Image: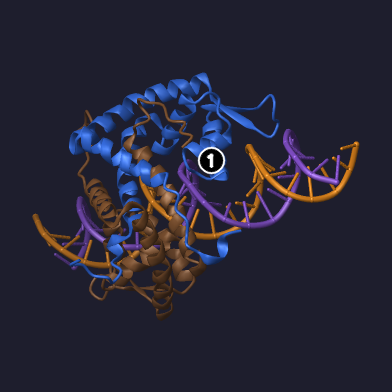
Chain colours: A blue, B brown, C purple, D orange
Amino acid sequence: MTEAHKPGFSDCNNATLRRAARSLGRFYDDALAPSGLKSTQFGLLFQIHISDEPAMGTIAEALIMDLSALGHTLKPLIRDGYVQTFPDKDDRRVKRVRLTPRGQAKLDEALKLWSVAQRQFEKKVGAEQAAKLRAALDAVADLDLEMPTVAHSL
Amino acid sequence: MTEAHKPGFSDCNNATLRRAARSLGRFYDDALAPSGLKSTQFGLLFQIHISDEPAMGTIAEALIMDLSALGHTLKPLIRDGYVQTFPDKDDRRVKRVRLTPRGQAKLDEALKLWSVAQRQFEKKVGAEQAAKLRAALDAVADLDLEMPTVAHSL
DNA sequence: CGCCGAAAGTGGCATATGCCACTAAGTTGG
DNA sequence: CCAACTTAGTGGCATATGCCACTTTCGGCG
């Protein structure tokens, strides 16, 4: 096996992932800056766009993010008039989300900026490689990881 | 499963990366929870540990994070007595960082928890695959991405 | 030596994210 | 029908990160 057993932190999958996320996030943020959107906001707007007036829980699940975190992240977008929420007709607990016309326009604007960054990235790493990487990341994200914590089976 | 993904533009490399980071981050956070450290804090402590009383700028560079962000992230760790800072002897602008004995102990404690999560992860995706993924992520993080920004003279 | 621009941090402000406790609203079993 | 449980969000609190505007030091340079 030729390698050490001692924990080399440089081998931490999570730390490596976060580091890459900071780096790439910065790049996409810069690209989107002219639109005034952060890459996270752009992603959120897009997710709403491709869904059909999704419930908050649905969005949170798709993005694998905490429901309350989504609620917080949504606030600036609501404040700026890009999205609006409305109660589900059948279940009053459910709050659905949709883009406003202004949000749609902003998304369209951001998409142009995004595609430049996206192309730039794929030019660097290769479209094929990028696709593989995304597939790997999706696989990781969808892993059903559980801590072998003994006392947690209830 | 239950993917709310539609083909096409939802192939944003950045969004995919963040999504995976949220997912994996939670897993490692859960694993480290008994120590009271977040995975980010653990990573930071470790980085300090493997460096030799690094300057803040050095740490920020290694982790590809904003210097001011590092400063903020460091605060809870200082407050809790895990790390301490001290001025560089030759350059009074430079602030160096080191673990306190207590920080070292906490890191040791966290390392045990971390290794469980790490092993769990690698068991799921395979050590080989994990290594490849980390390599790919490091490559992405170290890419010299530049926006083909149109105008401007520096 | 004294002014100037670069380098390293700090603080403030804003968004990103999570967890927890709590409320409101469906669901279900008796 | 009502109590108990479950589901969907909210609000508060804390950390994670970034950018920008300073402030303090350093390193030149005339």
* Image position, residue B102 (x, y; %): 43, 78
Asked if residue B144 is positioned above or below residue A119 in the image, the reply reads below
Q: Is residue B96 visible?
A: no
* Image position, residue B104 (x, y; %): 39, 76
Residue A147 or residue B55, whichever sits in front: A147
Asked if residue C28 is positioned above or below residue B39 in the image, the reply reads above
Q: Which residue is mark 1?
A: A70
Identify the residue at image location x=36%, y=62%.
B119
Identify the residue at image location x=39%, y=37%.
A39
Identify the residue at image location x=34%, y=68%.
B46
Residue at the extreme bottom of the image, as rendered: B101
Describe residue B39's horizontal placement relative to residue B87 as left or right: right
Residue A73 or residue B72, whichever sits in front: A73
**Which quadrant would residue B74 be assigned to in this image?**
bottom left
- As helix, strand or loop, the secondary structure at mark 1 comes to helix
* Image position, residue B84 (x, y; %): 39, 74
Identify the residue at image location x=30%, y=58%.
B60
